Image (cartoon, rainbow, N blue to C red):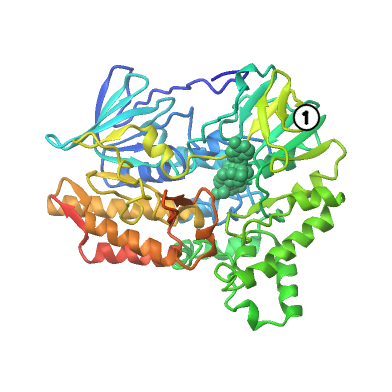
Amino acid sequence: MTGNQVERDGSGRVTVDGEVPAGDPGDRRDCDVLVVGAGFGGIYAAYRFRQMGLRVLGIDGAGGFGGVWYHNRYPGARVDVDSTDYTFYFSPELYRDWRWSERFATQPELLRYLNHVADRFDLRRSFVFGTWVTHATWSRADRHYRVETDTGLTVAARFLVMATGNLSRSRDLRFPGLGDFQGDWVQTSHWPEHGVRYADRRVGVIGTGSSGVQTISAIAPEVAELHVFQRTPNFSIPAVNGPVDDAHFEGVCADVRGAREWLRTVPSGTHSRRGTKRTSDYSPAERQEIIERQWNRGGHEFAMMFTDQGTDEAANAIIAEFARAKIREIVKDPEVAEALCPYDHPIGTRRLCLDTGYYESFNLPHVTLVDLRSEPIETVTAAGIRTSRREYELDLIIFATGFTAFTGAIDSAGIRNERGESPTDGWKHGPRTFLGLMTERFPNLFFLTGPGSPSVLANMAAGNEHHVDWVADLIDHMRKTGATTVEPTTEAVEEWGEHVADVAKNMLRLRVNNYMVHVNEDGSRVFMPYIGGFGQYVQRAAEVASRGYPGLVLE
Ligand code: NAP
């Protein structure tokens, strides 16, 4: 990278001594399942597959467990789903023993939790860290993926499980002049373990999605100057963080297995409350009261108050205007408030940000909003950032510019079938998957929370647990039937794609550009995650299993 990128963490490579020891560079190891990624999905995958007696090796480029929570260490990083939901449910004892300290846990606490789980189930010995998969080629002759890594370690694996998340590969930075910048720069998505000094410095933040909003809110009080470079304003809702609801927690503890099953029946995979009536079922005064009450309760339920808010423009406009009025109320400078108000998309059609004091930050005298719609960035200079209007002198630039969603991590692993194709070669018009977990012509390849699964629209912890269970049951079925390879048919992939499109077709979200929407050259749009709800998704996946896996070719 160019310029003074704050040094990222060292490789932290750890050699393990488990059933499938990773060994030294140059070594070759055989395993049944190679799990790529050591976040929620990878940790549970290693546990579950090992329980089945499979030889498992986990690989992650990071220096330890955590996945997204390993890399996104930026100030203010915390989960935006209630911690008591965003957690493992597979072990009632684990659930009961871990006490989350806050409604929305911080990144350090999440990292402690994931390490705790890894240690509790003795998973460390199945993983090798500081190792990136560079190639994974399917060999039909011996029915294995031949996997190469950047450390020289090679692996032969019968099954390849990509537990790499869908928001893990950062979007490429394309800012002219970055190499000339004399200050420091860093990405929220790869925040170094040793930290970044921002207090008392002149800081610029580019990007106002969830990562930017959390970073800005956290650093604003401590920096000398903060310039927020905003291209598109997003709606941000108060998180209303606080202590865990003990009564709720105890209630779940009383029947963790029951709660796990119940979460698999509801659209969000969480205990969030969801409105059951339309906006028009209420008088304006009643509606206002519901919205106000929800604003004060905080959290993503703000996107679920009425059944028509995601599909009906007029209904949505009521809520959007409420949120804009709040921004105008909080932000003292009317011009700044107006620039922060989103008008170009219905509320909730881009994932809502949850914040603690985001809009209030703009009342601090040393915080400025740079509206890139009226003064676009021209170049990064030695001293800072020059827009069409002026130069902003900076000591530190923080890029919170997002991810190559859904396909980035799959592409990074260099997966190829025997024809030399990559899984995403056929995805020019949008992802082609079966249940968001598999794609055609790639035997024995699974990606957890992939496009076509509920992924970011539901509880990712619950999603990962479900996917691993489904894959584990499939592998078990293969063992029982003597099959060694499995892949979906083109028809099954197309059918699933049609269903994914069908459940999204009336959603306002489909019309709005953001990382969940794939836009084709002819203007047609594909909504990548499955928006039919986690419960409905789980049911469909269960039906596939109970009917003996129609749509899959088992050989
Ligand atoms: P994001 O939502 O994609 O936001 C990226 C931001 O960078 C946008 O404001 C974007 O502007 C801006 N940007 C990108 N390229 C730019 C450029 N060249 N010049 C100026 N601005 C540019 O990414 P994110 O904030 O990392 O969040 C992604 C998702 O991760 C979230 O939706 C959420 O699912 C997850 N997340 C969750 C949490 C949490 O649980 N608390 C925290 C962080 C992230 P445009 O909108 O104009 O493109």
Which kind of residue does numbered mark 1 sit on? Arg
Q: Position of residue 270 (x, y in %)?
A: 53, 61
Q: Position of residue 279 (x, y in %)?
A: 64, 77
When the figure is inspected, residue 309 is found, relative to residue 449, above or below; the finding is below
Front position in the image: 287 or 132:
287
Residue at position x 75%, y 60% from top? 324
Q: Position of residue 117 (x, y in %)?
A: 48, 42
Q: Is residue 199 left or right of residue 443?
A: right
Residue at position x 33%, y 32% from top? 414
Ligand 1 positioned in quadrant: top right
Q: Is residue 29 visible?
A: yes
Residue at position x 67%, y 33% from top? 377
Q: Is residue 78 visible?
A: no
Q: Is residue 546 left or right of residue 176?
A: left
Q: Position of residue 229 (x, y in %)?
A: 70, 38
Where disc 1 sits, the SS reads loop
Q: Is residue 323 left or right of residue 122?
A: right
Front position in the image: 465 or 216:
216
Quadrant in which the N terminus is drawn: top right
Residue under label 1, please give it. Answer: 390
Name which quarter of the figure residue 317 lies in.
bottom right
When the figure is inspected, residue 413 is found, relative to residue 491, above or below; the finding is above
When the figure is inspected, residue 265 is found, relative to residue 97, above or below; the finding is below
Front position in the image: 348 or 445:
348
